[in-house]
Image (tube, helix red, strand yellow):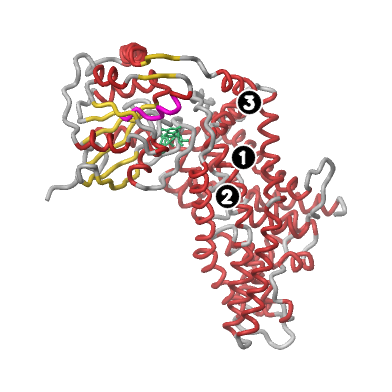
C-alpha cells in the first residue's frame, strides 16, 4: 500500500490554521489571537469524507516563501519539499482570513505559483460578516483556478466541504500570469481580486476603531495595561485564598488520616512528610495558577495582547528590543520554554538572542508557588487603602522586578554582547473577538493539567529523593535529623556560600533540588521542616507557621528576590542550548542570572535588615 497523502496548512499568521488543524484532527494545538503562535510544524491524522486517511501538517504562519525568520523558514522548506527527511506535501490548503483578504491573497498567489494541488479555506467568514463584509467565493475560485471553501474553523463550519475538496484536489495548471508575478504585481492583483470578491461592505468597525484609539493611546493605553495587570495580581490572591485554604485543610485531613491508619514507621513518614507535606504543598496552588491563566487566555483570545505588544514597542525600543520580543516574553510568564521557542518568529539574530537571554526573568508560573508560600507566611493579608490587598501588591512588585531586571539586562546586552540597532516592528493587529468559553475551558484545563503533571512527576520524584537523603543516616537521640542526614551535610557546603545574603541552611538546601523545577523549593522546604519536626501531632501541613518560626522577614524577602532572577530550571537551560546551538549561551545565561540573583538577594537582605524589618 502506498503511504497516505500529506496535506499542509499554509497561510499568513493568525489566519486560523491551527484552529482549522484542531477542528480537523481533534488535536489541541495552541491557538491565540495574535500572529506568531505556531513556530514548529505539527502533525495529525484526518479521515477525509471519502474515507481516505491523510496526514495533516500545521505550519507556522508566513508572509512569503523567502523566509525572514526561523519559523518562516520551516514553512518555506516544508512547502517546497526541502525539509530534511520529510516528503513534499501532496496537497496545500491555503488558509485565508476572509476579513483581511487583500493582504492574505499576496502570499496565496505565491503558493499557487508552485503549481501543486491546492484548496483554499476562506476562513473567518463569520468575522467578515460581523464587520459587514459580504464575499463571493465563486469570484475567487475563478480568479485563482482552485476550489475556495468558506469556513469558520472555531465553529467547525465548512469542514466537510473542505475535506471533500481536499480529496478531489488535482494538480492545477497555474492560471495564466500567476506563475511569474513579482511581489508588486501580486499586490496589485490581490487588490483587484479582493475588490472583485467583495460584494458589499458596510463599515461597522466604529466601535473597534474607538476601542483602539483608547487602548493604543500613548498615554492612556499604558495606564490601562498597568491597571489591568494590577487587577490580575490582586485577583490571584483575593480569589484563590478561600480555595487554597480548603485544599490545605484537605491535605491536613489526609495527613491525619494516614497517620491514624498506618503504624509509625518509614512508610508513614514517607507518605506524610515526603508526599503529602512536600508535593501537597505545591498542589494547593492550583487555584492561583488557574486564575492567572484565565486572565492571560482571555487577553490573548480577545486580541488585547497584540495591542499590549504594540504599546510596549516604544518602551522596548528604548532598551534596544522591538515589540516582536513582546509575545515571546509574554509567553515566558507561563514558562520560559515556550517563550524561548517563540523567539523563532524574530528575524534579527541578535534581537532573538537578547530575547532568549532575558526570557527567564519573566516570572514563570513555576515561581508562583514559591512566591505565594513566602508571601502567605510573611506578608499580612491586610489592605493598604482603597481596598488594595498588600499580598497582591507584593506579588505585583515581584513580577515588575523581573520585568525591570530583564529590561536592564537587555539595555546592557544590546550595548555590549549583542550590540545592534533595534529593528523595526510591524505587527498586524488582530480583530477583537469575545473569548469563546469552550476554548478558554480547554486552555485552562491544559494549563492546570501541566501543573498537576509536574507535581506528579518531577516534583514528586525529586521530593521523594530528597526525603530519602534527609532521613539517612538516622540521627542519634537528641540530634536533629536534618543535621545528621546526607542532605544536611550537602547543604552545609552551599550554606557557606549563601550565608552572606542571609540564607540559612534550610534555604540553601531547598535551592539544590529546585534546579530541577522551581516549585521544588516549596516541596523541599515543606519536607525538610516536616522531617525536622519531632512533634508528631504537628504533622499537619502548616508550612507557613514553620517558615515564620525559622526565618526572619529580611530572610524571606531575600529568598523572594533570589527567585526573581535565579535560573533555577534545567529545562530552560536545555532549550537555550538547543535554540542557540551550543553551550556558550546557556553557560552565559546561568552565570549572569545567578550573579544577579545573588546581588539582588544580598541587597534585599541587608537593606531590609538596616530598615529594621
Ligand atoms: N471568529 C473566528 N475566529 C477564528 C476562526 N478561526 C480562527 N479563529 C481565531 O483566530 C485566532 C487565530 O487562530 P490560530 O489558529 O491561532 O491562527 P494561526 O493561523 O494558526 O496563527 P499562527 O500560528 O500565528 O500562524 C484565534 O484566536 C482563533 O480562535 C474563525 O473561523 N472564526
Ligand atoms: Mg498556528
- Residue at 79% from the left image edge and 54% from the top image edge: 381
Q: Residue at x 66, y 72 (%)?
A: 528
The secondary structure type at the circle numbered 1 is helix
* Of callouts 1 and 3, the N-terminal one: 3
Q: Nearer the viewer, residue 509 or 380?
A: 380
Q: Residues within 10 Å of mark 3 (few under 14, many from 20)?
A: many
| Secondary structure state at the residue bearing disc 2 | helix
Q: Which disc, if any, is residue 305?
A: none
* 306 to 567, vertically: above or below: above
Q: Is residue 536 left or right of residue 60?
A: right
Which one is closest to the eye, mark 1 or mark 3? 3
In whole angstroms, how far apart are the C-alphas of marks 1 and 3? 24 Å
Magenta stretch encompasses residue 124? yes
Q: Residues within 10 Å of mark 2 (few under 14, many from 20)?
A: few
Which residue is denoted by mark 3 in the rendering?
A: 215
Q: Quadrant of the C terminus?
A: bottom right
Q: Residue furthest right?
A: 612
Tell me which segment is drawn in magenta: 121-128
Give the labeled residue for mark 1: 406
Residue 534 located left or right of residue 215: right
Is the residue marked 2 within 8 Å of ligand 1, measured from its CB? no
Q: Position of residue 352 (x, y in %)?
A: 48, 35
Closer to the N terminus: mark 2 or mark 3?
Answer: 3
**Is label 2 or label 3 in front?**
3
> Quick check: 293 left or right of 192?
right
Q: Is mark 3 within 8 Å of ligand 1?
A: no
Say above or below: 183 vs 573: above
In the drawing, does residue 145 fall left or right of residue 332?
left
Amino acid at each position: 500500500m502506498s503511504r497516505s497523502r500529506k496535506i499542509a496548512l499554509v497561510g499568513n499568521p493568525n489566519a486560523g490554521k491551527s484552529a482549522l488543524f484542531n477542528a480537523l484532527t481533534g488535536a489541541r494545538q495552541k491557538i491565540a489571537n495574535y500572529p506568531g503562535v505556531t513556530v514548529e510544524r505539527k502533525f495529525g491524522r484526518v479521515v477525509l469524507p471519502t474515507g481516505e486517511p491523510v496526514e495533516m501538517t500545521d505550519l507556522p504562519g508566513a508572509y512569503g516563501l523567502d523566509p525572514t525568520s526561523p519559523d518562516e523558514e520551516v514553512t518555506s522548506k516544508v512547502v517546497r519539499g526541502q525539509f530534511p527527511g520529510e516528503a513534499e506535501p501532496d496537497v496545500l490548503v491555503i488558509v485565508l482570513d476572509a476579513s483581511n483578504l487583500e493582504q492574505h491573497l499576496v502570499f496565496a498567489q505565491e503558493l499557487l505559483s508552485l503549481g501543486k494541488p491546492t484548496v483554499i479555506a476562506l476562513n473567518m467568514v463569520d468575522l467578515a460578516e460581523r464587520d459587514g463584509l459580504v464575499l463571493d467565493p465563486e469570484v475567487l475560485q475563478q480568479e485563482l483556478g482552485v476550489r475556495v471553501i468558506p469556513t469558520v474553523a472555531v465553529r467547525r463550519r465548512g469542514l466537510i466541504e473542505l475535506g471533500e475538496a481536499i480529496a478531489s484536489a488535482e494538480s492545477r495548471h497555474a492560471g495564466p500570469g500567476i506563475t511569474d508575478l513579482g511581489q508588486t504585481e501580486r499586490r496589485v492583483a490581490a487588490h483587484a481580486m479582493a475588490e472583485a470578491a467583495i460584494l458589499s461592505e458596510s463599515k461597522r468597525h466604529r466601535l473597534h476603531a474607538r476601542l483602539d484609539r483608547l487602548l493604543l493611546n500613548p498615554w492612556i493605553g499604558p495606564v490601562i495595561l498597568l491597571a489591568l495587570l494590577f487587577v490580575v495580581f490582586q485577583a490571584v490572591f483575593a480569589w484563590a485564598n478561600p480555595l487554597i485554604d480548603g485544599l490545605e485543610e484537605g491535605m491536613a485531613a489526609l495527613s491525619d488520616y494516614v497517620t491514624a491508619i498506618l503504624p509509625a514507621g518509614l512508610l508513614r513518614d514517607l507518605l506524610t512528610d515526603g508526599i503529602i507535606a512536600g508535593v501537597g504543598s505545591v498542589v494547593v496552588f492550583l487555584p492561583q495558577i488557574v486564575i492567572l491563566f484565565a486572565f492571560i487566555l482571555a487577553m490573548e483570545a480577545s486580541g488585547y495582547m497584540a495591542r499590549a505588544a504594540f504599546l510596549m514597542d516604544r518602551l522596548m525600543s528604548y532598551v534596544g528590543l522591538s515589540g516582536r520580543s513582546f509575545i515571546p516574553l509574554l509567553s515566558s510568564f507561563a514558562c520560559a520554554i515556550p517563550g524561548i521557542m517563540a523567539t523563532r518568529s524574530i528575524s534579527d539574530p541578535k534581537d532573538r538572542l537578547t530575547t532568549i537571554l532575558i526570557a527567564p526573568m519573566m516570572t514563570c508560573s513555576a515561581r508562583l508557588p514559591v512566591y505565594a508560600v513566602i508571601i502567605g507566611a510573611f506578608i499580612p493579608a491586610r489592605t493598604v487603602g482603597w481596598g488594595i490587598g498588600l499580598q497582591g501588591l507584593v506579588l505585583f512588585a515581584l513580577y515588575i522586578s523581573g520585568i525591570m531586571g530583564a529590561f536592564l539586562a537587555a539595555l546592557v546586552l544590546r550595548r555590549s554582547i549583542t550590540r545592534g540597532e533595534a529593528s523595526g516592528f510591524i505587527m498586524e493587529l488582530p480583530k477583537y473577538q469575545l473569548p469563546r468559553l469552550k476554548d478558554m475551558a480547554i486552555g485552562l484545563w491544559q494549563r492546570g493539567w501541566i501543573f498537576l503533571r509536574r507535581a506528579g512527576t518531577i516534583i514528586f520524584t525529586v521530593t521523594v529523593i530528597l526525603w530519602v537523603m534527609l532521613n539517612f543516616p538516622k540521627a542519634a537521640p537528641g540530634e536533629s535529623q536534618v543535621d545528621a542526614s546526607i542532605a544536611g551535610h550537602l547543604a552545609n557546603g552551599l550554606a557557606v556560600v549563601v550565608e552572606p545574603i542571609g540564607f540559612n541552611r534550610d534555604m540553601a538546601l531547598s535551592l539544590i533540588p529546585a534546579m530541577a523545577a522551581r516549585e521544588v523549593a516549596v516541596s523541599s522546604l515543606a519536607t525538610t521542616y516536616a522531617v525536622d519536626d519531632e512533634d508528631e501531632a504537628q504533622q499537619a501541613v502548616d508550612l507557613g507557621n514553620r517558615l515564620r518560626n525559622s526565618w526572619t522577614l529580611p530572610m524571606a524577602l531575600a529568598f523572594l528576590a533570589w527567585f526573581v532572577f535565579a535560573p533555577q530550571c534545567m529545562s530552560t537551560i536545555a532549550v537555550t542550548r538547543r535554540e542557540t546551538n551550543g553551550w556558550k549561551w546557556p553557560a552565559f545565561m546561568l552565570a549572569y542570572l545567578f550573579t544577579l540573583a545573588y546581588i539582588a538577594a544580598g541587597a534585599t537582605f541587608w537593606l531590609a535588615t538596616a530598615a529594621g524589618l
